[in-house]
Image (spheres, grey):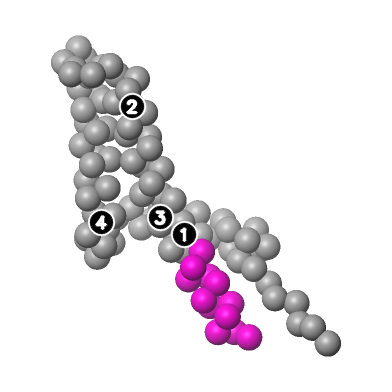
């Protein structure tokens, strides 16, 4: 007799909760707990500011390049938080068995 294990990716409610948590964790107080992600977070903020400044004509690189770097950094922040939230959900599922 085999028991069917449920993955966190199988439940849409859990995925929605993990996505919500990944944006909530963008709070600076949460980011300070992880120094590496804090640097990525601060770099994302700085690059976004540089992109906004470049839209007004003061630029070192093209606005599109600066924007793409900012998007990559923000994606990294959100995806790292999402992965951590999914890991927590998986851990809770494992403990419930």
Residue 64 vs residue 4: left or right?
left
Asked whether 20 or 72 is in front, the reply is: 72
Mark 4 Cα-neighbour bin, 10 Å: few <14, some 14–19, many ≥20: few
Of the residues tagged 4 and 2, which is closer to the observer? Answer: 4
Q: Which residue is mark 3?
A: 80
Say whether disc 1 or disc 4 marks the residue closer to the N-terminus: 4
Residue 14 vs residue 53: left or right?
right
Residue 48 vs residue 6: left or right?
left
Q: Which residue is mark 2?
A: 67
Q: Give x and y (percent) for residue 26.
A: 33, 53
Q: Secondary structure at mark 2?
A: helix
Q: Give x and y (percent) for residue 32.
A: 22, 60
Q: Which residue is mark 4?
A: 36
- Do the residues under discs 2 and 3 have CB atoms within 8 angstroms? no
Residue at the extreme top of the image, as rendered: 57
Q: Secondary structure at mark 3?
A: helix
Among the 4 quarters of the image, the one containing residue 72: top left
Which residues lie in the magenta part? 86-97
């Amino acid at each position: 007799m085999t028991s069917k294990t449920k993955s966190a990716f199988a439940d849409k409610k859990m995925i929605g909760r993990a996505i919500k948590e990944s944006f909530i964790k963008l709070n600076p107080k949460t980011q300070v707990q992880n120094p590496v992600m804090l640097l990525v977070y601060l770099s994302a903020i700085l690059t976004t500011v540089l992109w906004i400044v470049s839209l007004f004509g003061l630029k070192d690189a093209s606005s599109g390049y600066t924007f793409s770097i900012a998007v990559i950094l923000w994606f990294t922040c959100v995806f790292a938080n999402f992965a951590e939230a999914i890991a927590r959900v998986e851990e809770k599922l494992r403990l419930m068995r």
